[in-house]
Amino acid sequence: MSEPVFVAFATQKGGVGKSTLTALVASYLHYNEGVNVLAMDCDDRQHSLKDYRDQDNLVTEENPILKKALYSFYKNFKKKAYEIVLTNPKEAIRLISEKLNAGANPDVVFFDITGTINDPDIVMLLSVMDYIFVPVTIDTADMKSSIRFASHVVNKMITTNKTKIKALRLVWNKIPTRTKPNLCEIVDKYMSELGLESLESVLTNSCKFYKDGAVSGKTALFRSTVLPPDKQLLKGSNLPELVAEIRETIKV
């Protein structure tokens, strides 16, 4: 049995989309591409992944159309929804070890992490990751925070060869267009001088990424932890392109 790949979507600043990215990528891999996924919700300040799963369970139970879609999907899917484990940075390593020793066999384990790089528990957790993806937006404060965080991980952790981390990539999120605008290209050049690299694919600043349904009246889900993204909403989202680039990076 091969070892799972540990992947973290991590930042030290909230609001840049790490939990949304975690849910979108994990769900697309699990439900669209058949990759066995397990998610560790390590952000114990808010546990966004748990909130997403709770909302998903609510809308698919209360909305008849979604309830029917859920039944139809799992009848053909032949697997369960991926597990979301609630934890914190200090306990995450122990919990995932227990899961694997008990027979869990994921191909990829996603870790949703937020916190300062000065926290020893977060540093320890980051050190056992295979790959780290850092969301970055064009907001000045968000951008500075993400670049500062990524630079610290590269310079203080990756270059020392004392961690498992094979690569770190930044992910442009909440971008106005489907392709990188000039500002992103300029910042990419600056980041390359710092030894940082971003993925080519970007996610746009679109309300579709927050479509998680409602108790009644809405039937199109895009961000869901129990179903694949709606096919119509998937068009023009850049999500398949982003996932393909992530798969190429993490070699899964």
Image (cartoon, rainbow, N blue to C red):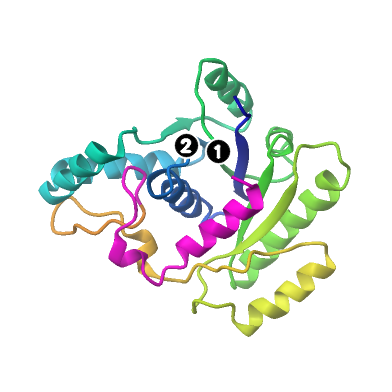
Mark on residue 36?
2
Tag 2, which secondary structure? loop
Q: Nearer the viewer, residue 181 or 232?
A: 232
How many marks do you count on the picture? 2
Q: Nearer the viewer, residue 165 or 20?
A: 165
**Amino acid type for the residue under numbered disc 1:** Val
Q: Is residue 175 left or right of residue 8?
A: left
Disc 1 to disc 2, how far (Cα)?
7 Å
Number of residues whose C-alpha sits closer than 10 Å to that of mark 1, classed few (under 14), some (14–19) or many (20 or more): many
Name the spot of residue 227 as percent of width and height, x first: 31, 47
Q: Nearer the viewer, residue 240 or 191?
A: 240
Number of residues whose C-alpha sits closer than 10 Å to that of mark 2, classed few (under 14), some (14–19) or many (20 or more): many
Mark on residue 10?
none
On the image, which quarter does residue 192 sit in? bottom right
Is any atom of residue 20 visible in this view? yes
Q: Is residue 76 left or right of residue 61?
A: right
Is any atom of residue 42 visible in this view? no
The stretch in magenta equals 224-252
On the image, which quarter does residue 138 sit in? bottom right
Q: Is residue 33 left or right of residue 245?
A: left
Name the spot of residue 2 as percent of width and height, x first: 62, 29
Name the spot of residue 102 as percent of width and height, x first: 51, 15
Tag 1, which secondary structure? strand
**Amino acid type for the residue under numbered disc 2:** Asn
Looking at marks 1 and 2 on the same chain, the residue that comes earlier in the sequence is marked by 2
Residue that badge 1 annotates: 108
Reply yes or no: does residue 250 show up in magenta: yes
- Assess whether mark 2 and mark 1 are in contact (beta carbons under 8 angstroms): yes
